[in-house]
Image (tube, rainbow, N blue to C red):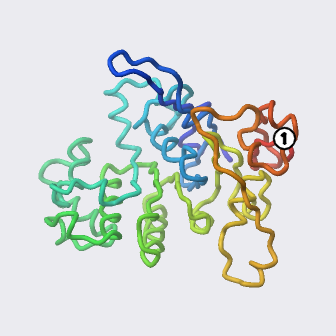
Amino acid sequence: MNNAEIIIEAKGLKKYFPITQGIVFQKEIGAVKAVDDVNFAISSGETLGLVGESGCGKTTTGRTLIQLYRPTAGHVIFNGVDLTQLKSKELRQMRSHMQMIFQDPFASLNPRWTISRIIAEPLKVHNVRKRGQIMDRVAELLELVRLNANYMNRYPHEFSGGQRQRIGIARALASMPQFIICDEPISALDVSIQAQIVNLLEDLQDQLGLTYLFIAHDLSMVRHICNRVAVMYLGIIVELAGRDELYSNPLHPYTQALLSAVPIPDPRATRARKRVILEGDPPSPANPPAGCRFHPRCALAKEHCRTETPVWREIKPNHWVACHEC
């Protein structure tokens, strides 16, 4: 990766949520380590996929990256600016360059607002357009996401799930951002609509030069849309590599288990491949295990895996992994 092309970078990023006890005088007795020392960079025009089990910290990573959650520690460098050092006013000015597409297209839209008001709000907040030009821009954005501009005076409940997600995409594009976090943007949609939304995101990326962090569970879709893929487990990234390299040569046992569960449209290939079954549930992020966090569920775990934290290292060019046995 060319450092000159990097648009956003996470360095030692941590986000802990305090666990408190007591009703009147609350005392902090611990913390949920949702994101714990995450490092990665995304180049301009790239799509980085972020995958892992539910509760592993994917969404928290995305929200902390654009400062919807302020990090507990670490740095986020966006176009050379450390977002963690900015005050509220300065951060608000930067927010026009970073947006988020949310998982649930209905919950993320105000049911009392018309579509025109929903999409116009970022234009007003960030002063992207003059007052007299706002409705024209709303119409342009609706056309951009392949919706009829005549729909702008309707309400969210009058649209299907796929149409609502297109409205959410139009709202994200309103401030003309460079970087967009797609937080499982297709998981709440019918299978028949998912491909349409992914194709739309790809077309918009080519047309507008966007950079994506694509958070998802569907590993087949991640392979289709992403340039590189990061695998997350219990608040940390355990493997990061190019899409084709990761899918053809997964090194971390957790990555191997995830990929072995991806459906293959070939019965012979399905029968021939070795299925990796993980035992037990992921440990609590409030009390992660010592050493390698994956060792309680890993068939390859040795004694040192239980006591020593794996070093994040580059096994081969642009293929990083945190595992003692790789």
Which of the 4 image quarters holds residue 220?
A: bottom right
Q: Residue 41 in the image: state x and y as whole percent.
A: 61, 42
- Which residue ends up furthest to the bottom in the rendered image? 267
- Which residue ends up furthest to the top in the rendered image? 25
> Relative to residue 176, is residue 213 drawn left or right?
right
Q: Residue 289 in the image: state x and y as whole percent.
A: 70, 34
Q: What's the residue at 25%, 70% (across, down)? A: 159
> Relative to residue 103, is residue 274 drawn left or right?
right
Q: Is residue 215 above or below residue 78?
A: below
Which of the 4 image quarters holds residue 93?
A: top left
Tell me if mark 1 has few (under 14), some (14-19) or many (20+) residues whose alpha carbon lies within 10 angstroms of its own. Answer: some
Q: Residue 158 in the image: state x and y as whole percent.
A: 20, 70
- The residue type indicated by label 1 comes to His
Q: What's the residue at 43%, 69% (across, down)? A: 197
Q: Secondary structure at mark 1?
A: loop
Q: What's the residue at 52%, 30% (across, down)? A: 16
For label 1, the residue is 324
Of residue 171 and residue 273, the one placed in the foreground of this image is 273
